[in-house]
Amino acid sequence: MIMRPSLPLAALLGAALSFLPGCESTKSSGPSASDTRAQDAASVQAAEAWARARVGDRVTYSFSATRGPEPRGGGTARTIQGQLTLEVVAVQQPWVWVRAAYRDEGGRPLSQTGLAQDLLIPVRADVSRPLDVPHGGTATAEVAASAGRSWEAVRYVSDHRSFDGPLRTRVYANAPGPLYLARGLIEASTVSAGFRVPGGYQLKLQEVREGSSEASAPVPALERPLGPGAYYERYVDVGPAPGLQRVCFTAERGYLLRTEGPVDTNAAPCSDFSQAEPEPLEELLLGLPSEVLFTEEWPPAAAANGTRGTYSAEGHDVPALIAQSNEDVEGTQRVFTDTYAADPWAPGLAGMPYEGRFQPLANSTDRVVAGGKREPEGGTRIVRWGSWLAGQK
């Protein structure tokens, strides 16, 4: 999810995150050379696991995310807790189709709009180029107890609290095995510090299930993609050269890749991710509940009392809320208009990446001149979206 913005909420990720206790574990005094070699080999083993993915492979984590009141007062503490399940729902090599589902502790859908629907994530089992994102932080070897098993693992701790940054902890298995869907992640937590809004998140492995080599299932329709396999195009009328910008997503062996740039009519859509910076998929998914806490509930407050209408784009009709605001600066009056999806999961948005659902579908700025007439000064609008996977090999 960012993702550079990988998801529209990503700018808020880490704004205020808190540390919560993680798995029980037995720590060693420090990582030996063999521990380091084992961790280096983990990414290779996880990559091989994607090639052996089976329908029914599943990992479930418990999660808890908290946001406290503002440091100088105002607001109340908010909490989300529940379970995140990643499950392989179809395999058509080189693609593995993973479903991400957030549920409350009773297995029911969450009330928060941003987490209320399952997300589909097609992941390539191969890679177009070498991909690796170092874990970072101080490494400590340990044996972590989770999901009824003991895992040889490495704990990574990055402590930036002395610089008003977060305390970040991640525990990864040396041999990911069935945890390949999250690159071997066993435990994760982050805590804010300094002047940040107090709050945070924790994620802990609860259950692992391996599928059957005989199981099969049809490839599902990409109606609610997290991002990979989908794209959207935005017409940008800002500056001297207005034009179309295309945002593309893919995923390779547990990494999300995102590109954004002018539409190249001479190339197949979303065919070049060579310059995209890889982002671990599990980081986006484990941070999403916290991101949702740090945003207003849908629709945004500015649009809650907006005018109802319909947003139309290339055959899609989406119920919308249209909000306007005015600003007067040194005698120049401007009118700002933002159009939001009334329901970001509406059928008319089928195929839209998560990122596109939770941002204005369109916005514009008009300058008010003599006689109350408005002169357009520019704006943006999403004009097209869908899956680019059709015909891919």
Image (tube, rainbow, N blue to C red):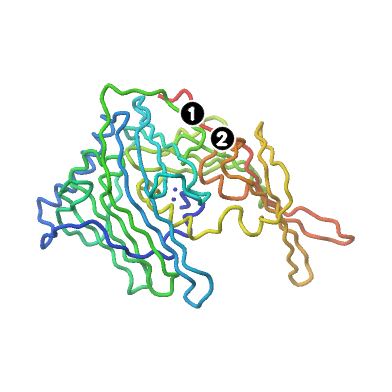
Q: Which amino acid does label 2 sit on?
A: Ala
Specify the amino acid type for callout 1: Ala
Q: Do tag 1 and tag 2 residues touch (Cβ < 8 Å)?
A: yes
- Kindly identify the residue that appears in the image at 63 percent across and 59 percent down: 301
**Residue of label 2:** 350
**Which x, y percent locates residue 349?**
59, 38
Question: Where on the picture, by quarter, is residue 19?
Answer: bottom left
Residue pictured at 32% horizontal, 29% vertical? 55
- The picture quadrant where one finds residue 50 is top left
Category of crowding for the residue at label 1, using alpha-carbon neighbours closer than 10 angstroms: few (below 14), some (14–19), many (at least 20): few
Give residue 392's mark.
Answer: none
Q: Which residue lies furthest to the front in this view?
A: 106
Q: Is 363 on the left-hand or right-hand side of 15?
A: right
Residue occupying image coordinates x 48% and y 25%: 390
299 w.r.t. 69: above or below:
above
| Whether residue 26 can be seen here | yes
> Relative to 249, is 140 above or below?
below
Q: Residue 221 carries which label?
A: 1
Q: As rendered, which of 291 and 297 lies closer to the eye?
A: 297
Q: Is residue 5 above or below residue 216?
A: below
Farthest residue to the right: give it: 371
Total marks shown come to 2
**169 displayed left or right of 64:** left
Quadrant where the image shows the C terminus? top left
The CA distance from mark 1 to mark 2 is 9 Å
